[in-house]
């Protein structure tokens, strides 16, 4: 029996006859020889069909194949140094499953709107393939990392009656006779998890009614939110540094083929895998911007160009710590040495990418937290359960949220978040 293998397994089968199920991405022929460009979801490679090796009927069948036709092939795997992938198959038989007509995405340049309108098909192309494979490696690396560090995965709800990150960017929905919101962040529930299990992380979709059309904002994005009991902010920064280094290391180790498809300059990525991220205070970052002649006042929040400027000064991610309390959410703990600042940090990715992580130590004192909720203008009734965490066994605890598409966009060196998620949701895009 001939083994049915994937393209990715080809290196283990050099010189052997195998069977494969594939789709056609492109085709070239010169009378007696045909080159079929093939994909199967695991990689892309070439099939070579010689007229003399098959019946006339089979050769005609191959000639009739159109882009995205699906079929089985049988043949022998050979090394092929000229190709990207390094292997090819010499085809001896071919069975059609379905042929196609007029596949809309050709092997030429298309505009981004056209491609996004055809996202359901575009995902089959090389570039989205590479990005989604890297996304998958980062998902697996995330689970591996937090398991190794003693965290449990803890699922936060998506339907909520509270607003963890402020009320301006909430998606409101009718929930029978009540109001509800789509989750902006799983953090408050992760804090529940931390007091029940010590160390937890959530990983799920979050929603922000971002009216801004920027390359860094989606209305639906995925966030990883670790939360740790008995942990101060500086220890949380250590975890962040280990986690981000590990993510980068795993992608460099296991996604060479995909990084190559994207043309990613891996040398620019490598320092991030080594750790040793600078920890800069907000005050010093402000000074850095002012020294560079930029128009920036203490107390302002950084805009994308400010973050880009700061992050370009480093070859790896950089933490900005201790933001003024006026520009961060209510649950953070004030710095006892400087109550105008929170014990918090954002992590900015290099090469101008800006914020990929936001995190802080959480206020653990009941009275202080209650006052901060009221100051933020939030309805205390909705936070009774959250305050229970400070009534019963409250401990110092810290956590952070990694915007998953932000991290992918940086690691893959994309210029817009929309390519980092299978089906991007933005202010004017809900389809497909
Ligand atoms: O900084 P944010 O708002 O922090 C939180 O939500 C905290 N509750 C996290 C925590 O401490 N558990 O969001 C965290 C990250 C940002 O750093 C950014 O990477 C990403 O989420 N993010 C977005 N990604 C894509 N589209 C958007 N509209 C985003 N808004 C935030
Ligand atoms: Mg933030």
Image: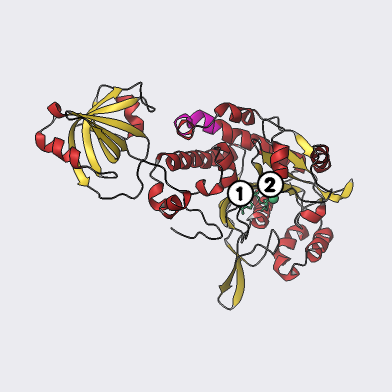
Q: Position of residue 148 (x, y in %)?
A: 58, 36
Residue denoted by label 2: 304
Residue at the image position 61 percent from the left and 60 percent from the top: 183
Give the Cα separation between the discs numbered 1 and 2: 9 Å
Q: Residue furthest left?
A: 56
Q: Is residue 364 visible to us here?
A: no
Q: State which tag comes first along the sequence, 1 or 2.
A: 1
Q: Which sits in the foreground, 317 or 289? A: 289
Element at badge 2? helix
Element at badge 1? loop
Q: Does the residue tagged 1 have its C-beta within 8 Å of any atom of ligand 1?
A: yes
Q: Position of residue 246 (x, y in %)?
A: 59, 33
Label 1–label 2 contact, CB within 8 A: yes
- Residue 418 sits inside the magenta stretch: no
Vertical comparison of 309 with 267: above or below: below
Give the residues drawn in magenta, as a range: 250-258
Residue denoted by label 1: 216
Mark 1, other Cα within 10 Å: few <14 / some 14–19 / many ≥20 = some
Residue at the image position 37 percent from the left and 37 percent from the top: 42
Q: Residue furthest right?
A: 337
**Overall secondary structure of the magenta stretch?**
helix
Residue at the image position 61 percent from the left and 40 percent from the top: 150
């Amino acid at each position: 029996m001939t083994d049915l293998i994937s393209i990715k397994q080809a290196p283990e089968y050099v010189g052997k006859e195998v069977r494969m199920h594939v789709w056609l991405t492109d085709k070239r022929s010169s009378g007696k020889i045909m080159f079929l460009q093939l994909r199967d979801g695991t990689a892309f490679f070439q099939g070579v069909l010689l007229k003399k090796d098959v019946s006339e009927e089979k050769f005609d069948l191959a000639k009739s194949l159109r882009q995205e036709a699906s079929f089985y092939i049988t043949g022998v795997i050979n090394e092929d140094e000229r190709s990207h992938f390094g292997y090819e198959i010499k085809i001896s038989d071919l069975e059609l499953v379905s042929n196609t007509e007029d596949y809309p995405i050709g092997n030429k340049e298309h505009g981004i709107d056209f491609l996004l309108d055809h996202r359901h098909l575009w995902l089959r192309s090389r570039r989205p393939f590479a990005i989604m494979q890297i996304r998958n490696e980062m998902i697996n690396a995330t689970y591996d990392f937090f398991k190794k560090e003693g965290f449990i995965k803890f699922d936060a709800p998506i339907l909520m009656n509270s607003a963890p990150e402020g009320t301006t960017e909430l998606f409101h929905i009718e929930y029978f006779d009540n109001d509800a919101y789509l989750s902006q962040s799983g953090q408050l529930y992760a804090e529940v998890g931390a007091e029940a299990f010590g160390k937890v992380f959530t990983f799920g979709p979050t929603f922000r009614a971002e009216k801004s059309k920027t390359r860094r904002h989606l209305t639906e994005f995925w966030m990883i939110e670790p939360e740790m009991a008995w942990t101060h902010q500086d220890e949380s920064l250590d975890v962040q540094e280990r986690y981000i280094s590990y993510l980068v290391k795993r992608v460099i180790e296991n996604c060479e083929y995909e990084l190559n498809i994207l043309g990613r300059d891996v040398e620019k990525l490598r320092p991030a895998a080594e750790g040793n991220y600078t920890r800069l205070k907000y005050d010093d970052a402000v000074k850095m911007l002012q020294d560079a002649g930029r128009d920036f006042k203490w107390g302002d929040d950084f805009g994308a160009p400010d973050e880009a400027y700061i992050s370009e000064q480093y070859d790896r991610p950089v933490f900005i710590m201790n933001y003024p309390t006026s520009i961060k959410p209510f649950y953070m703990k004030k710095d006892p040495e400087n109550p105008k600042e929170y014990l918090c940090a954002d992590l900015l990715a290099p090469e101008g990418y800006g914020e990929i992580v936001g995190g802080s130590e959480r206020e653990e004192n009941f009275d202080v937290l209650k006052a901060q909720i009221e100051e933020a203008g939030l309805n205390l009734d909705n936070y009774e359960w959250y305050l229970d965490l400070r009534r019963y066994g409250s401990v110092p605890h810290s956590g952070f949220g990694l915007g998953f598409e932000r991290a992918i966009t940086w690691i893959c060196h994309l210029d817009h978040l929309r390519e980092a998620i299978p089906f991007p949701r933005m202010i004017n895009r809900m389809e497909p």
